[in-house]
Structures are given as C-alpha cells and as structure tokens.
Image: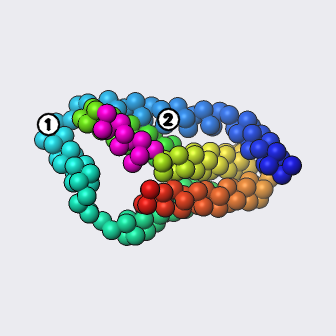
Amino acid sequence: MFGLQLQLLIRDYFKERIFIVALVLILFVMGNIFGVLSAGVLEPGQKADLLNYVEQGLHGKVILENSIYVRQVITSYLQTIFFLFFMGISVIGVPLALLLIFTRGFVLGFSIGFLFENLGTKGAVLSLVGILPHNLLALPGLFLMVVAIIDCAAALTRMRFSSRRVQVTEELVQCAFLTMIVLVIMVLAGLVQGYV
C-alpha cells in the first residue's frame, strides 16, 4: 500500500515537472554526444598519457588507497549537492546546475568513448564495470536534485514577480526533503564507486 502511494507520488512529481525533466535530459544527452566526439579528436600525446594512466590502474598500481578515495568521492558528491541546494534557493544557481548536468554528460561520454575507441571490447567491459555501477545511483540523484532546485527557484521567482500567492515554505521544505534523499543516494554512489 505504502509502496504504491510512493510510486504514485513520484510519478505525479515528475509528471508536473515534465518540461524541467526533459530539459535536464536533453542537456545530459548533448553533453554525452559532445564528450564522445571530443574523445575522437585527442592529440596523440594526450591519448598516450590517458592510456598510460588507465593501464596503471588496470595492472594493479595503487594510485590512491580505497578508503581515502571513497572519502574523497563522497565529500565531492556532498559538496556538489550542498552547492546545488544553496545555489537553487538563491535562484542564480540554476544556469550553473544546468551546466553541471551538461558537464557530467560530457565527462561520461568522453570516458566511455575514449575507452571504447582505444581499448575496444576491453574498454566496453571496463566502462560497464568501472563507470556504470556508481552512475546508476549518482545520475538519478543528480537529475532529481537539479529538477528540485529548478522547481524551487521557479517558485521563488514567481513569488517575487507575481501577484498570486505562492507557497514558498512548502517549496523550500520539499526541496530540502529531496536534498536529504539525494544526499543518501550520493553516499551510496560514493561507496559503490570506491569499493565496487
């Protein structure tokens, strides 16, 4: 019963914000496409440096201890989410949030394109085991956060420039609640990235 209510609540939330969701997804896909294209135009020296770095990791050379790496990844994720939250409630951060989505898409597209182009099947497998697992958590969390702050910023803007009454407190509480959910998702993504 509770699961069905939660599912309906989530569906309704995204249905009401379909334009924002579409915008975020389009920017992410555009970033992916540009990233894949950029991987193909690297200078030979840059390609060799990146391949050397990948080979070091594949042959067991420890660049960073797992526990230190996990701590750094989780800290980075949490800083990003807090940055997005405060930028969203100040309204000026919406373009930065959209830029972050595009950049994330670019980095993923570049990484997967580079590995596949230079390592072939080995690169595809490496992408599946090294890039995909934590992004199955991190990307939906990031998308949810960006949709939430754009929605919150839109409500704050409506309040400022509209004569209609807007429930700002409700929007802020909703955004803060979604931020807490995203923080948990990002901690899990960091653990998966560091240990899996």
The quadrant in which residue 12 appears is top right
Let me know if residue 122 is in the magenta part: yes
> Which contiguous range is marked in magenta?
121-132
Q: Amino acid at mark 2?
A: Leu
Left or right: 114 in relation to 73: left
Q: Is residue 41 above or below residue 10?
A: above
Q: How is the image coloured?
A: rainbow
Q: Secondary structure at mark 1?
A: helix
* Category of crowding for the residue at label 2, using alpha-carbon neighbours closer than 10 angstroms: few (below 14), some (14–19), many (at least 20): many
The quadrant in which residue 119 appears is top left
Image x and y of residue 164, in percent? 82, 45
Give whichever of discs 1 and 2 has the lower sequence position.
Answer: 2
Q: Residue at x 54, y 59 (%)?
A: 188
Residue 103 visible in the displayed image: no
Q: Secondary structure at mark 2?
A: helix
Left or right: 105 in relation to 61: right
Q: Residue at x 42, y 35 (%)?
A: 31
Q: Is residue 13 above or below residue 156?
A: above
Q: Which residue is mark 1?
A: 44
Q: Residue at x 80, y 53 (%)?
A: 167
* Total numbered badges shown on the rendered structure: 2
Q: Which residue is mark 2?
A: 27
Give 14 or 97, whichever is nearer the viewer.
14
Image x and y of residue 189, in percent? 51, 56
Residue 8 visible in the displayed image: yes
Tag 1–tag 2 contact (CB < 8 Å) = no
Q: CA distance from mark 1 to mark 2?
A: 29 Å
